[in-house]
């Protein structure tokens, strides 16, 4: 391993736990702390743990402006997505068997939908527009008599693009279908007001918002009421929707992280927006760099750029002191380029050439400056190595070349 | 993706010092140059390999090689590894080079074996091109 510090620009993948969160979590583990089982009603250990869980639930509810009783703890956003999608579909299957989602959803949404197809449901997977957005019109057009659920993410994890929940929700309300939103990337980045948003279920994750991994939550609306069939049985915790002893320290961590997110959203946003502007301005000076996703309709903490004529995995290897993600096939076990970028209608070679930079609370001015310097150098070097760049400089249109595929 | 240290070193050295690792181009129209280009941008890798040969006895010998590769780290490392194997070999010897030798030299993971196949294809094509000119 390199002894040099690796610059972390992969906050959309996960964030470090804020030290303030970690120190709070430590108070709920050890013999001198509040280690009790929140379900124990017969002694103070249980009562104290239960108090902590309920306080955390209030912090989560407070960030998204809902009733704490609408928050169900899960092991993370993946479980929350599974619980929402399978839970609604199985509970309401007598009302209809059609589900609408999009091709740019996280696998935590797509895979449960595939499972429901195996169980006899019919699923429509919508294409995004060129800017990486699922339009309300597309939802409207896909609506059927038997549509029971629409599941669309709030912020796309690869592109940072935003979907219009207000408008989509109006359509689902009118059609009488439930609306689930994967908001794993949203908390602490944009305001969410569930008291007015026409959303029925929303998934949250702690570890994208400086909380611990292994804990998340599902918002399940009470008015109008949404019923779901549980996935996990064994004690009837969380009003029967999710059994299992509550992990107090994880929950306290998520609560604290979301409390801080509410307090610091504005200052985090201001800082990250300035990094985004600087990074965008400098990176776009590199020839044939293209932004993926509508730059005017996205969050500033995620920036997805394709550097044409350079393959993404080699770029990531070249950027060895910077932690970033790529849509390149070569970084995935499947050898398929990012399905999100392909859904945008980008040419495969641009999908292969994409890098996702994501900034966060602990990103510094130096991180941005150093990354831009290294990025410029490595793109230059890899282009010097690239036969495609050479052909481009020779004036050859790569689209007209007959490739000798293997 | 866990690469062997050999792949990482080869890739990094080639990137740091491209000239020393035979990155570059020859004029493909020259009679003593053979060019092979395989792969496709949409698949994520394209290798271009050029050999400069001269007659020796009743055969031809590879005097110099230049390459350029667009592709993942192991594709670049595979091309660079192949180039080192080629210099000084006769065309007959070069034709005998199998992708397995590159796999072994770089300890390529199974999912990256196609990179070595591409390298083997590129030398075959470069030799064909050269021989067609003689």
Image (tube, coloured by chain):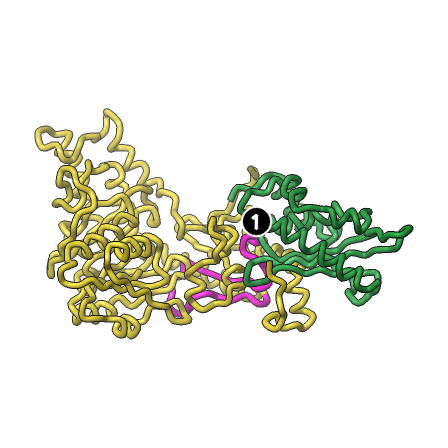
Chain colours: A yellow, B green
What is the residue that sits farthest to the top in this orientation? A31
Of the 4 image quadrants, the one containing the N terminus of chain A is top right
Residue A103 visible: yes
Q: Nearer the viewer, residue A363 or B60?
A: B60
For label 1, the residue is: A317
Left or right of A133 in this view: B95: right
Residue name at image x 24 percent, y 25 percent: A31
Q: Position of residue A208 (x, y in %)?
A: 35, 49
Based on the picture, tell me whether residue A295 belongs to the magenta stretch. Answer: yes
Residue name at image x 15 percent, y 34 percent: A48
Q: Relative to residue A34, is residue A17 depicted above or below? A: below
Residue A385 visible: no
Q: Position of residue A395 (x, y in %)?
A: 67, 73
What is the residue that sits farthest to the left in this orientation? A42
What's the magenta region?
A287-315
The residue carrying pointer 1 sits among few (fewer than 14), some (14 to 19) or many (20 or more) residues within 10 Å by Cα, namely some
Q: Relative to residue A217, is residue A44 depicted above or below? A: above
Of the 4 image quadrants, the one containing the C terminus of chain A is bottom right
Secondary structure beneath label 1: helix
Based on the picture, tell me whether residue A48 belongs to the magenta stretch. Answer: no
Residue B110 image-quadrant placement: top right
Q: Nearer the viewer, residue B18 or A357?
A: B18
Q: Nearer the viewer, residue A189 or B95?
A: B95
Left or right of B131 in this view: B114: left
Q: Position of residue A160 (x, y in %)?
A: 39, 61
Residue A251 image-quadrant placement: top left
């Amino acid at each position: 391993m390199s002894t040099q510090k690796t610059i972390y620009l992969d906050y959309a993948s996960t964030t470090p736990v804020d030290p303030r969160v970690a120190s709070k979590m430590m108070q709920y583990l050890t013999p001198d702390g509040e280690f009790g089982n929140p379900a124990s009603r017969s002694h103070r250990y249980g009562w104290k743990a239960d108090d902590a869980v309920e306080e955390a639930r209030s912090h989560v509810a407070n960030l998204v402006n809902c009733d704490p009783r609408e928050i169900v703890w899960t092991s993370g956003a993946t479980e929350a997505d599974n619980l929402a999608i399978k839970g609604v579909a199985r509970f309401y299957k007598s009302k209809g068997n059609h589900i609408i989602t999009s091709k740019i959803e996280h696998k935590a949404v797509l895979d449960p939908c595939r499972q429901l197809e195996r169980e006899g449901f019919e699923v429509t997977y919508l294409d995004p527009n060129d800017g990486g957005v699922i339009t309300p019109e597309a939802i409207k057009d896909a609506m059927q008599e038997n549509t029971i659920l629409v599941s669309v993410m709030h912020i796309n994890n690869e592109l940072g693009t935003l979907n219009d929940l207000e408008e989509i929700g109006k359509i689902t309300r009118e059609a009488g279908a439930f609306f689930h939103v994967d908001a794993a990337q949203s908390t602490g980045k944009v305001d969410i007001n569930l008291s007015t948003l026409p959303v029925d279920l929303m998934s949250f994750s702690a570890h994208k918002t400086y909380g611990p991994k292994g804990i998340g939550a599902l918002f399940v609306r009470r008015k109008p009421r949404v019923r779901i069939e549980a996935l996990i049985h064994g004690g009837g915790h969380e009003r029967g929707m999710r059994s299992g002893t509550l992990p107090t320290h994880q929950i306290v961590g998520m609560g604290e992280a979301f409390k801080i997110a509410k307090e610091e959203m504005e200052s985090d946003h201001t800082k990250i927006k300035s990094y985004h502007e600087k990074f965008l301005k400098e990176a776009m000076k590199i020839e044939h760099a293209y932004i993926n996703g509508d730059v005017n309709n996205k969050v500033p903490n995620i920036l997805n750029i394709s550097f044409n004529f350079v393959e993404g995995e080699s770029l990531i290897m070249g950027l060895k002191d910077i932690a970033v993600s790529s849509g390149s096939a070569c970084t995935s076990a499947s050898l398929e380029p990012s399905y999100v970028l392909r859904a945008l209608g980008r040419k495969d070679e641009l999908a292969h050439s994409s890098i996702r930079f994501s900034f966060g609370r602990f990103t510094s001015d130096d991180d941005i400056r150093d990354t831009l310097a290294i990025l410029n150098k490595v793109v230059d070097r890899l282009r010097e190595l690239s036969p495609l760049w050479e052909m481009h400089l020779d004036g050859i249109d790569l689209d007209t070349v007959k490739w000798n595929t293997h | 993706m866990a690469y062997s240290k050999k792949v990482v070193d080869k890739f990094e050295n080639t990137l740091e010092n491209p000239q020393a690792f035979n990155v570059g181009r020859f004029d493909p129209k020259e009679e003593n140059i053979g060019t092979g280009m395989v792969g496709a941008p949409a698949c994520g890798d394209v290798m271009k390999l050029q050999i400069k040969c001269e007659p020796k006895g009743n055969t031809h010998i590879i005097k110099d090689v230049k390459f350029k590769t667009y592709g993942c780290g192991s594709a670049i490392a595979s091309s660079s590894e192949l180039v080192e194997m080629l210099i000084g070999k006769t065309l007959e010897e070069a034709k005998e080079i199998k992708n397995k030798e590159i796999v072994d030299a770089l300890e390529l993971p199974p999912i990256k074996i196609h990179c070595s196949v591409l390298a083997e294809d590129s030398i075959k094509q470069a030799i064909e091109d050269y021989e067609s000119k003689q």
